[in-house]
Amino acid sequence: MPSAEGQIRFHARELDRPDVQALLAAHLAGMHAQSPPESVHALPLEGLRRPDLTFFSARDADGQLLGVGALRELDASHGEIKSMRTVDDARNRGVGAAMLAHLLRVARERGYTRVSLETGTPEGFAPARRLYERHGFVRCAPFADYREDPFSCCMTLQLDGSAAD
């Protein structure tokens, strides 16, 4: 299968577009369907407008939404990946890997030396955990405001400064 990354265009700050809002609503509903409310760390739409967070959408050459993701600055050297989600029709086409590569490029451009994330432990999150592991993320202790939680898995990646993974 050819890489999707070359066919994807990334756009910052498209939170007001209806297709993005629908995908984010589905993302949040999916998180609540798999985890108890106190274990859901996905941000609602307004939470993605934070000044320390940059939201990206991924679109194909025709402008169709393929997925979303965000990068939050925790401090000058540490970023957090938030709200990665692929449109159902685009799953297994490399969209998640392309978004992750994009977010890691942005993190390196910002000078981050570490990027972390939180994802779920239920079986529905297994594909996400495998994606992150394939790109070098390893499990870590809770970071930032996260706490130990049987429904959460924290992961981190030390960045080496190279331009691509």
Image (tube, rainbow, N blue to C red):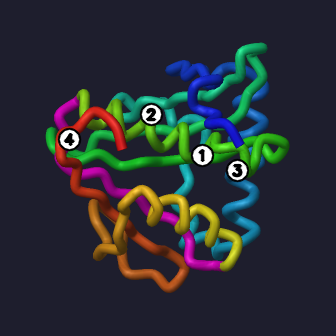
Quadrant containing the C terminus is top left
> Do the residues bearing badges 1 and 4 touch, measured as CB atoms within 8 Å?
no
Choose mark 1 or mark 3, whichever is in front. 1
Instruction: Give the mark nearest the N terminus, 1 or 4.
Output: 1
Dot 4 corresponds to which residue? 112
**Residue depth check, mark 3 versus mark 2: number of the one nearer the observer:** 2
- Which one is earlier in the sequence, the residue at label 4 or at label 3? 3
Q: Which of the two discs, 2 and 1, labels the residue nearer the N terminus?
A: 1
Residue 34 against residue 18 in the figure, above or below: below
Q: Give the residue type at disc 4.
A: Tyr
Find disc 3 in the rendering and name its residue.
27
Question: In the rendered structure, which amino acid carries the disc numbered 1?
Answer: Gly
Residue 104 lies in quadrant: top left
Closest to the observer, 91 or 65: 91
Residue tagged by mark 2? Answer: 102
Along the line of sight, which residue is nearer the eye, 144 or 158?
158
* Mark toward the viewer: 4 or 3: 4
| Residue extent of the magenta highlight | 110-122
Q: Please tell me which of labels 1 and 3 falls first in the chain.
A: 3
First of labels 3, 2 by sequence position: 3
Residue at x 53%, y 29% (from the top left corner)? 56
Q: How far apart are the two marked residues, 4 and 3, measured between alpha carbons?
A: 27 Å
Q: Secondary structure at mark 3?
A: helix
Q: Residues within 10 Å of mark 1 (few under 14, many from 20)?
A: many
